[in-house]
Image (tube, rainbow, N blue to C red):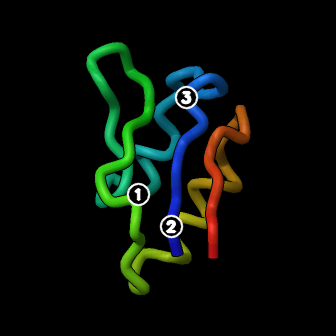
Amino acid sequence: MRVHVKANECQGHGTCVMVCPEVFSADDQGFAVIENAEVPAALEDTVRRAESQCPERAIEIDD
């Protein structure tokens, strides 16, 4: 699984960082940054939860 954040849609709520800090982090302005574009199998469910909780739907997953 690969994941990325649509930078033009992220509003910096930080939900993804709170749900899965192993994959997502925030830049200096609070917008999401992907630490690991290729998601380890053990974190796939957590990344899917972050995707579903993003209020802007800015997270995309490619299986």
State the residue in front, 37 or 48.
37
Q: Nearer the viewer, residue 22 or 8?
A: 8
| Residue on which disc 2 sits | 2
Image height check: is 9 above or below 42? Answer: above
Write down the residue under mark 1.
20
What crowding class fits label 1: few (fewer than 14 Cα within 10 Å), some (14-19), or many (20 or more)?
some
Residue pictured at 52% horizontal, 75% vertical? 1
Helix, strand or loop at mark 3: loop
Q: Amino acid at mark 1?
A: Cys
Q: CA distance from mark 3 to mark 2?
A: 16 Å
In the rendered picture of this protein, how many numbered marks are placed on residues? 3
CA–CA distance between discs 1 and 3?
A: 18 Å
Question: What percent of the width, then of the height, locates residue 50?
Answer: 57, 55
- How crowded pointer 3 is (Cα within 10 Å; few <14, some 14-19, many 20+) is rated as few
- What residue is shown with label 3? 7
Q: Earlier in the sequence, mark 1 or mark 3?
A: 3
Is 14 left or right of 6, judged from the image as shown? left
Q: Nearer the viewer, residue 53 or 3?
A: 3
Q: Are marks 1 and 3 in contact (CB under 8 Å)?
A: no
What residue is shown at x 51% (from left), y 67% (from top)? Answer: 2
The amino acid type, in three-letter code, at marker 2 is Arg
